[in-house]
Structure formats: structure tokens, C-alpha cells
Image (cartoon, helix red, strand yellow):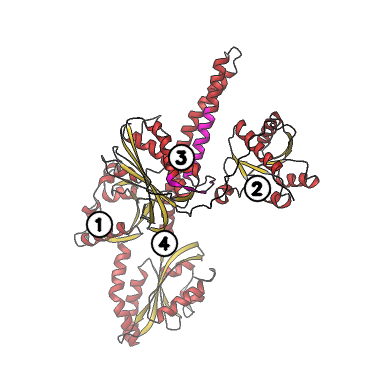
Amino acid sequence: IWVTRLDRTRSFANRAYCDFIGLPYEEALVFDWRSIIHPDDVAEVVRNSVAGEASLQPFLLEGRYRRADGKWRWIRSESQPRWDPAGRHIGFIGVAHDITSAKQAEIDLRNVNDVLERLIAQRTAQLHSSESQLRAILETTNQYQGLLDLKGRLLYVNGTALAGIQAEPAQVLGALFWNTPWFDATPDAPVVIERAFRSARAGEIAKLDLELQLPAGPRHIDFSLRPVSDEQGGVMAVLAEGIDSTERRRNEEALRQAQKMEAVGQLTGGVAHDFNNLLTIIRSAVDFLRRRDLPEERRRRYVDAISDTADRASKLTGQLLAFARRQPLSPVVFDVAAQIQSIANLIRPLVGSRVEIDVDTGLGPNYAIADVGQFETALVNLAVNGRDAMNGEGRLSIALRRIDEIPPVRSQPARPGEFVAISVTDSGSGIAPTNLDVIFEPFFTTKEVGRGTGLGLSQAFGFAKQSGGEISVHSTLGEGATFTIYLPQAQAPEQTAAATLSRADPAGGLGHRILVVEDNVEVGKFSTELLQDLGYTIKWAKSADEALAALAEDEFAFDLVFSDVIMPGKNGVELATIIRERYPGLPVVLTSGYSSVLAENAHQGFELVQKPYSVEAISRVLRRAISERRTRPTG
């Protein structure tokens, strides 16, 4: 077993690989395997290897290789492309088997196929005299072998096939092939095999992959049924062959699982590193705040440090969710050109005076549909990355254009449609070719320790993909880089009167009643205490059903429902939907740190407060929701 990178160098080889070529592990990784291919096979093996890698599909190679002891051995290798969690091609996985014995038997079998057909056609004593020779050849193969007459009855079966069902020849010979114990315990298998037999009897080669329930347990068998022709070209029998691919599949699955665990390890390691840094600040600040003799100025400084660190932690989780395409988005139709001009004003002080910014948005507005806040964050992240690549001095260009097709990206085919393309180009040092395939992975960074989390590009990647678009990168080392975000185009929104946002009620929560729905006891206690401190009258329900029961008793007892999203039983979105149907005048505010319900279905028009939230934010949202209810006309 071995694993290769895109540059075709090995990143892993197992013990069997090293033993075969007779080299220690480190030398085996850089060993040129082509040097031990048989001279008669090298041209075809190399040609098929190049073609297989270029296809980005699983491919097989077969040839003779010189073992460390000098003996030539037939080797059958099966390779398939590797993909990272984002769907990018990162190399190949290979598994090889020594098939010398089976290959020799296969060669012998191929040489006597004509003899077999002639023997069946002649139906003479020659068939009887040659049967022992043919049987010996068939019994040496590790394939399941069986010969069927034109009615599908089994005329011959080899020992390998009989061992698979732990049966004797007399138990299956003469029976219809699809009614034998190989297929009895597998639903639908007899129908599939009979259909394949009829295709073979008609002169076609039928191939199929089945998972059969055999006495040894479930086994994956690669089947083929092919016609056996007589001298006149007519079909006289059907040859059934099967290869047990169970172990190969298990090996491949084990390799895939190892890759997944490696990716999870990288992600969790990055998260742990960054969160431990943030928790260190919070823990240290809390320890100082416990001191009674701490001056007020230093107390405020530590409180501010805790608040700032909480904001950074919230931003970090937001970036992770954006990369995973699980960030709850609020897509709206917006003028991309106007938004870029606005963001450019924000970017200028961020990149510094020595970076010249060029903005080309074309003529007139260009509308797209996406989450504006996430779009701004992605564009700022790209600009800051460009600034760092230029060491704070150079030219940063932002361009906007309409396109009718997203070009092929990361082995994905071109995607036709109406899109807007936003490109950010820097004149910096460029990106090394080896980094282009991993640049969007979370926590990947080429910056020094302490300069960035490695999540900026992954956030932009997740935002673009979740918005129905794409992101690409083009770079030549030493000549800068261009990142392009593609977003779906949208029609210009209808002109409507500008909505007037409700101002915060200066009276705060005094006199207003809120039904808090939270299943977590600690969060529920904290939320109720926080809202009571803001002046609200609170009733706490620990489930959606308990909240609905409270509303059923008196729907006018509350001015607002404040509910978590993730709860056992009905979730917060389901609860809010029921309340909107039963009590249309009662506002609902949802809160969540993350929910697949929100990520997949948004929040269906309900106000959403992201955790962790500040006192100011929750106070503003609740007062606005209650104020809008009071001013909304009834009837």
C-alpha cells in the first residue's frame, strides 16, 4: 500500500512495499518504481499510469516487477484519486497484490479457451479425454469459475466457487445458476443474475458488482458472464466468473478512514490552539478580577479584555461555520458595485497608505443575492491577505464583471449560469504551486506564528459555496495572486419605500413580559436573570411543549417569546412557526450558536440573535420586536 502526492512522490508506503523492493522506509519513499518493471512491460505500464492519473478516476496496472531477491513477479495495482474534505484532488492511493500464481493460471486459461469451445462444440471423446487437463487449469485460479448451458444450468464449477458456499459439486451441478446457494440469501440477486445470463446468451458480456450473503459473511464479488462461441460464431455456452474483492475494498475503506481522521486531527488541533489562547486571556483576567485590592482602572481593563476576547471567540466560531457551510445566512438582493465601493473605503485604512487600491466596478449596478455581512467579511479577508503578501506596499485591484459561466475549478466542471465575479488581485509574492491545493483549508497559513488564524480564506470559501457560488485562485510565484468570488446574479429589486427601523424603547424592558424557552438549565438561569436585570417579567419554559401549554392558558400573558433553537422534541424554528400560526400577533426571537436547522433552512423570517450575544444586542433586539408589535395594526 502506498500514498502519493500530486508531484508523484510517496508520502507513505507500508512494510510489504518496503520488503518487496528491499529498501528501508525513507529510501522506499523516493525509490523510482519504474526501474524494476520488466523491459517488455515498462512502456505499457508507464503509459497506462500516466493516462490513469490524468483521468482522475480509479485505474488498474498490471505487469512484471523484479523483487528484491531478483525474481520477476506479476503485480496487479489498483489506484484511485485522493480528495480532501473540500473536494480537491491531492494525490493517489495505491494497493498492489502479487498475482503471479493467478496470472499464470489466467494465461494458461486464456490459452485453452479456444480448446474449451472446440471441445464443447465437438461433443466427442476428445472432450472427455481433455476434461481432466481443463479442470486442473480451472482449479488453480483464485476466481470463481462456472460453465452454464444455454438454459442457465450449471455444467461445471471450480473448487474456489464451491468453497465460497461450502458445498459439494453434486449440490449445485444441473441447477439453474441463479437458484444456487451463491444467491439464495441475497435479495434480488437471482433476478439480476438471470438478466445478466440472458444478455450473455445473446452474445454480450455482462458485468456486475454484487454484495452476496455467503456462509463466510457478506462478500463483494465482481461478476462477469460472457458467451462461449463455437467455430461458426454461435453461442454454445456461458462462462461465469467472479472475483472476491472484499479485502481490497476493506483496505481502501481503511485508507479513506485514515485520511478523514488526519483531516479531523488537523482541524481540532487548530481549534484547540486558538481557543486555548483565548481562554488563557479570559482565565487570567478573571483571576485578577477576584483580587479585592485591584484598582478600578485595571478592573475595567480586564473586563474589556474579557469582552474583546469573547468577541474574537465568536468570530472564530463564525469562520469555522462559514468554512463548513453551516453558517446561518440572511441572503438579500444587493448592488454589488455599490457594496464594493463602500468596502473599499473600509479597506483603505486597513491596508495602509503605501498600498494603492484600484476599484473597477463597471457601469451601472450589478445585483447579486447573498448575505451582505458575510460578503463584506470575505472581501476584507482577501484584501488583508493581499496586503500581507505585499508586505504592506504595492497595488491592490478589485474588479467586478458579469459572466455566464463559472470556469472549471478544483477538478469541478464548468458551471453555466448568470453570475457576478468579484476579483481581488495583489502585486505580492504570489503563492507556491504546492500551496494552491490546500490554501482554502482551515488553519492553513504561511504567516508567522501569531499573525492570523488561517481561517480567512476558508471563511471566504465556505461563504461562496454556501451562497451557491464558487471561489478560485490563480497565482504565479513572484507575480502576485488573484482571488475571484462568484455569486449568483439577481434581478434589480423593486423600488419600495424605505423601511423605518424601530428605535430602541427608552423605557427598556419595564412592564413587558417574556416567555423564555430554554432546555439547558444553566443557560436558562442566566438568560432569565439577565432579562430580569433589564426590567422584564420572565416565565421560563424548558421545552417547546411546555411553552405552548403556557400560551394555551393565556395567550395575552406575554409580549414576546425568546427561544433557543436546539431543543429536544420540537426545535425553536418549529415552535416559532406554530406560534406564528396560532398567535399571529405575538413576536418570536430565536437564539442559537449553531444549528443545522438554521444553516439548511435559515430562520424563516424570525428575528435571530447569534450566541454569544452582548447585553446591548439582546436588549436592542427585544425592544425593537416588542415595539414593532405595539405599532403593528391589528384586525
* Cα distance between the residues tagged 3 and 4: 49 Å
Label 4 sits on what residue type?
Ser
Q: Give the left or right position of residue 217, taking residue 142 as reference.
A: right
Label 2 sits on what residue type?
Asn
Q: Check disc 4 and report the residue beneath it.
A: 245
Label 3 sits on what residue type?
Thr
Q: Is residue 246 in view from this perspective?
A: yes
Membership of 336 in magenta stretch? yes
Badge 2: residue crowd in 10 Å (few <14, some 14–19, many ≥20)? some
Secondary structure of residue under mark 1: strand
From the top left corner, tell me how far across and down residue 494 is, in percent. Answer: 53, 53
Badge 4: residue crowd in 10 Å (few <14, some 14–19, many ≥20)? some
Q: What residue do we see at 73% from left, 44% from top?
A: 547
Q: Check disc 2 and report the residue beneath it.
A: 571
Q: Is residue 455 in view from this perspective?
A: no
Label 2 with label 4: CB-CB less than 8 Å: no
From the top left corner, tell me how far across and down residue 362 is, in percent. Answer: 37, 48
Q: Earlier in the sequence, mark 4 or mark 1?
A: 1
From the top left corner, tell me how far across and down residue 45 is, in percent. Answer: 25, 60
Q: What residue do we see at 29% from left, 79% from top?
A: 114
Q: Check disc 1 and report the residue beneath it.
A: 65
Q: What residue do we see at 54% from left, 24% from top?
A: 304
Q: Check disc 3 and report the residue beneath it.
A: 377
